[in-house]
Amino acid sequence: MELREFLDQTIEKNKPLIAQGHVATYIPELAKVNPNQLGAAIVNPDGTIISSGDCNVKFAIESISKTVVLALALLDNGEEEVFKHMHKEPSGDAFNSIIKLETEPDHLPRNPYINPGAIMTTSLIKGANKEEKFNRILTFMQKIAEDDTLDLATETYLSEKATGDINRALTYYMKGQGVFPADVNDTLDVYFKQCSINVTCISLAKIAGFFARGGVLSTGERVIPKRYAQIVTGLIATCGMYDQSGAFLDNIGVPGKSGVGGGILCPLSSKKIGIAVFGPAIDKEGNSTAGMGILKDLSIKMDYDMF
Ligand code: GLN
């Protein structure tokens, strides 16, 4: 069976899992999204794309942006500097938990993919002001997604900003402990905007392909050193699905980075393949229920193995 036909069938097969999740409601704009959408896309090593379902629907990238911003922060500052501000270990807690900021002796975030670590990473992006910092993130994301149409969803951004008090609490906590190196409100503004960039399943799969090829575009152009792509993908494997990261890697066998908009980005470096799914109904950890079902079926069918 053609892979395209398999994707069509597995999307249908996993539709019942939509009922096991709900669209995110803590960001009001995301609560308006139709939960019944499902899409999948695969980018082959040569850049060709196989896609199915709602693969051209625009949705908010949310936490998947954390991978792209980490890559840019590494380019801007180097590995040593970035990891003076955060650890590289799973947290075992929810993405917006404050617990470990208090209990870690140095009060630094456990990793760049939970919210405090991601906000810390955003604070390291270079730029004269918050507008320039966000524009650098957007331009970098467009480049590695090979898609100039990626843009800010203003309504989502305003919605995140209006309801982002837990993110404010996390950031002020770090500031109060003397470990946050930048202005709290300016950094949060950039963070809310980066989470509110609209992507499609296809553009996400292209970003996954970029990381899977070790930081090289489908044209062959190298954008980041291979080492930085390894850091981004290694941490996706260990921390990308929050406190479900271990079970996800065990069940599905590919690294995944989720967002509460319903996307999951999977860079499969061993095969130089980029995969993305979109299903806005998410579970309590914030991960797409049907999206994970599709990835599991695909992984079994293709015998995907990250080692
Ligand atoms: N913008 C969201 C937040 O900060 C991202 C969370 C996520 O996708 N897990 O809460």
Image (spheres, rainbow, N blue to C red):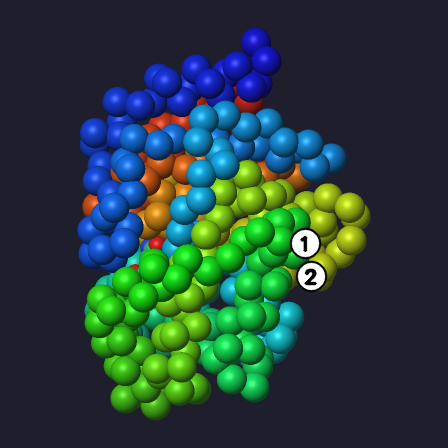
What residue would you read off at disc 2?
224
For marks 1 and 2 on the same chain, the one whose residue lies earlier in the sequence: 1
User: 287 or 240, which is in the foreground?
Assistant: 287
In the rendered image, the quadrant that contains the C terminus is: top right
Name the residue type under label 2: Ile
- Please determine whether, in this image, residue 232 is positioned above or below residue 9: below
Q: CA distance from mark 1 to mark 2?
A: 5 Å
Q: Position of residue 121 (x, y in %)?
A: 47, 72
Instruction: Tell me the tag on residue 215.
Output: 1
In the rendered image, the quadrant that contains the N terminus is: top right
> Going 73% across and 44% down the picture, which residue do you hit?
218
Of all residues shown, which one is farthest toward the front?
155
Whether ligand 1 has any atom under 8 Å from the Cβ at mark 1 is answered as no
> Going 36% across and 43% down the picture, which residue do you hit?
262
Tally the marks: 2
Q: With 303 as the anchor, is 224 left or right in this view?
A: right
User: 28 or 77, which is in the foreground?
Assistant: 28
Q: Classify mark 2: helix, strand or loop.
A: loop
Q: Position of residue 14 (x, y in %)?
A: 34, 22
Circles 1 and 2: CB atoms closer than 8 Å? yes
User: 115 or 157, which is in the foreground?
Assistant: 157
Of all residues shown, which one is farthest toward the right?
220
